[in-house]
Image: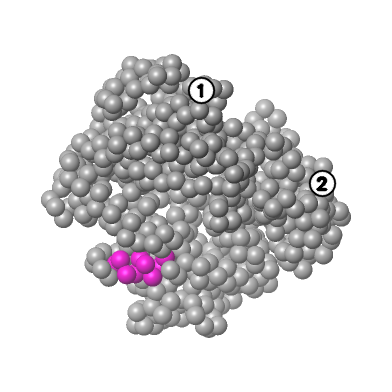
Amino acid sequence: MRVIYDLETFPNVFTLAAEHADYPLKWSFEISPWQDDSRAIVEWCQWLANQDAQMVGFNNVGFDYPVLHTLLQMGKATAPILYNKAMSIIQAQDSNRFASIVYPSDRYVDQIDLFKIAHFDNKARATSLKALEFVMKMDNIEDLPFPVGTFLTQEQTNILKQYNAHDVTATKMFYHKMTEQIDFRTALTEKHGRDFLNHNDVKIGKEIFQMELEKVGVQCYKYGPNGREPMQTKRPSIRLADCIPSFINFEYDEFDRVHQYLKSQVITETKGVFNDLSANIRGLDFVFGTGGIHASVENQVFEATEDHMILDLDVTSLYPSIAIEQGYYPEHLGPTFVDIYRKLREQRVSYKKGTAENAMLKLALNGTYGASNDQFSVFYDPQFTMKITLSGQLMIAMLVEKLLGIFGLRIIQANTDGITVYAHRARRMEIQLVCDAWESLTKLQLESVEYKKMAIRDVNNYIAVKLDGTTKLKGDYEWDREMHQNHSALVVPKVAEQVLVRGVPIRETVMNWPDKYDFFLRIKVPRSSHLKWGGRQVQNTTRYYVSTAGAELVKVMPPLAKNPEKWREFAVEKGWTVQVCNDIRDAFEPINYEYYINEVEKLTLAMK
């Protein structure tokens, strides 16, 4: 049995709401001057433990459960005690976010934390429950109704309990989108006899990798008076010449200039190596960076014809494959690391794309490379990091150079692990011979896909149409987005795709778009700021759409030190009026289609 739960803490009020994961069975508890469910909560948790139940929450491992654990340990607690515990957790998050964590073996009831499983605790993926309410198209998006620290009245407590229950409903909706990931973690836990339940995909992959190393006797940690410390290779300096394969060479002066520059460098840290490092080849700028090599034409549309083709060439699992085929490994882990890397790559191929196992192993393979530059990881060796990133970029540059030797071939784009070219079909065999020679030299494998059309704004934003009619969407053209990404105004990329792929008219398509939720946008401001709509304050997380009626939405931010009396105001969607609709029943004003038409035009009309 699984139970979804959430709690709220105020100086004089504590509430807990819960709902069965699969049935409409609900619980509500309160500790306040008017009601004391303290003992009832303890008995309820004891009942859950007897049922071998799991409690599911959103950031419950980091916040909700440690507060609840305090109550369970005491057997009875007041709202001020639990509020103080909550504040101590919040205040410690920046300095020591692990200080209040209750280890799985000490928990009264097992916990499943959707926040951690989805890796929302990573800054690049940070996502609130309110943002998820927008993504999941809930009828109501509700912010905390009272400022933290407010002493609540009985009437306010009733409002808080409704809000608490609403958060549980939102968490339950998200839980049902995460059941495949949870089941996968449950199976891994049972298979390996260690707790994977609240691990994100990358953490699972790195731990599986570490387990495989330990199985064959590779030491990943050293133990001393201060406890366990990761084995690592720390380097006072790195000669980049030692990181570049000997077979790398160039005929183009610009590529060779970059190559020689890199070989001459000795660095003490991995940052700053690629500042302003680029090569201009036939009018196209190839930019070298920590994330890989990038180049692209801009604002152009390419179409395949009887005579010409659009061919995309991608390296299979670039970073892991470089390590495996070149024999790169963190020095302290030894060459066995390469054998394990190869084994995990082969395991990934055995699972179909789209499965949880395939996704986890992909992130594990790539995540291990990322961990090699993490000072807290057992994989840490910055020279290993530089070997992979330098080899990858220079190998791609070599492929570019050789392909440009083919008459009439144009480079449309180059990115971290591949190249897209426009070439005469009669040159297909020459392209294949170049690719074969490159594969033989680098020991990497290329996968090729033909497109029948490609509309490319830049290297990060494009639409590519495959021969079977399916599309590959990147950046601003991508609308099938992950939960942590911005889902505002999805009508814009959806219509842009229709315009660029099928040639539909912009205005007519926007005005007849059937899903009104695709017109909604979301804004969030921190607690130090607030939003004003038509002069009145609205939620810090607000859903809205651009309307012919409505009012101006303004972000109000704290004063700067040089002018401490003046709060700063910034218009949201400057020049347009909007309709706030955190409650979907407020979405009655007409949509201003002109705004959305303009946004689609920005993505389409510049294309040549």
Residue 70 spot, x, y in % from top left? 40, 66
- Mark 1: few, some, or many residues within 10 Å (few <14, many ≥20)? some
Residue 182 spot, x, y in % from top left? 40, 68
Q: Mostly what secondary structure, the magenta segment? A: helix
- Which part of the image, by quadrant, shows the N terminus? bottom left
Q: Nearer the viewer, residue 384 or 497?
A: 497
State the residue at coordinates (61%, 60%). Answer: 135
Q: Nearer the viewer, residue 189 or 12?
A: 189
Residue that carries the numbered disc 1 in the rendered image: 281
Colouring rule applied to residues? one colour
Three-letter residue code for mark 1: Ile
In this rendering, would 23 be left or right of 382?
right
Residue 271 in sight here = no
Q: Nearer the viewer, mark 1 or mark 2?
A: 1
Q: Nearer the viewer, residue 578 or 395?
A: 395
Mark 1 vs mark 2, CA separation in Å: 43 Å
Image vertical order of residue 318 relative to residue 382, above or below:
below
Image vertical order of residue 194 relative to residue 369, above or below:
below
Q: Which residues are magenta?
A: 181-189
State the residue at coordinates (46%, 76%). Answer: 3
Residue that carries the numbered disc 2 in the rendered image: 576
In this rendering, would 497 be left or right of 364?
right
